[in-house]
Amino acid sequence: MKRLLIIVVFASLAVLSGCDTSPKSPRGFSLPEGDPKVGQAVFVELQCNACHQIPGVEQLQSAVGEPQISVKLGGKVSKIKTYGELVTSVINPSHRLVKGYPADKIQSDGESKMRNYNDMMTVRQLIDLVAFLQSKYDLLIYDPTRYRSYKL
């Protein structure tokens, strides 16, 4: 019984620690549903496909002939890309820089080379773009049967 009480107390503390009520808390933040088809048009209109490669969207070729970085978006992932992560990636691209690409191709002095669209993108475009991006990720389901233990 004492052990159960300790488990309940620690579980409660863990849950309560996730309830951030500070003024900068994202709690209560929600945008309306977006339209992925319109979001794909926004992706192309804003020329996101100049630097990002996504299944089903033709990538723009560099007019200058210099090698162009192609940051891949979408596909199968082991961790879901949340709505908040995708919104943040668009409106604050320097928040978290992508790994696995040459630093000089994606950043300059620690800041993302991605153009800031905040002054030219409407909220509606952002909502639809994020809906489109989110639709391009497939969550890989963990399969515990792949890893079998054998008795010796």
Image (cartoon, rainbow, N blue to C red):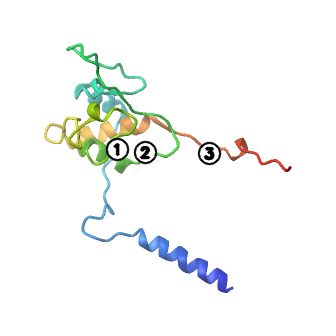
Give the CA distance from mark 2 to mark 3.
Answer: 16 Å
**The N terminus lies in which quarter of the figure?**
bottom right
Q: Disc 2 vs disc 3: Cβ atoms closer than 8 Å?
A: no
Which numbered disc flags the more N-terminal residue, 3 or 1?
1
Q: Residue 12: image x %, image y %?
A: 51, 76
User: Spatial distance from mark 1 to mark 2, Cα to Cα?
Assistant: 7 Å
Q: CA distance from mark 3 to mark 1?
A: 23 Å
**The residue under label 3 is which amino acid type?**
Tyr
Local secondary structure at mark 1: helix
The residue that disc 1 covers is 86
Query: Residue at position x 14%, y 37% from top?
Result: 120
Q: Which mark is residue 136?
A: none
Q: Mark 2 or 3 closer to N-term?
A: 2
Q: Which numbered dot is residue 81?
A: 2
Looking at the rendering, which quadrant does residue 73 occupy? top left
Q: Is residue 61 left or right of residue 2?
A: left
x 31%, y 31%: residue: 38
The residue positioned farthest toward the bottom in the image shown: 2
Mark 2 neighbour class, 10 Å CA radius: few under 14, some 14 to 19, many 20 or more: some
Q: Is residue 48 above or below residue 11?
A: above
Give the mark, 1 or 2, whose residue is nearer the N terminus.
Answer: 2
Lateral position of residue 99 relative to residue 75, left or right: left
Q: Secondary structure at mark 3?
A: loop
Expressed as whole percent of the image width and height from the top left, the position of residue 100 reads: 40, 35
* Secondary element at tag 2: loop
Specify the quadrant of the image occupied by residue 68. Answer: top left
Residues at badges 1 and 2 in contact (C-beta under 8 Å)? yes
Reading the image, the residue beneath label 3 is 142
Amino acid on which the number 1 mark rests in the picture = Leu
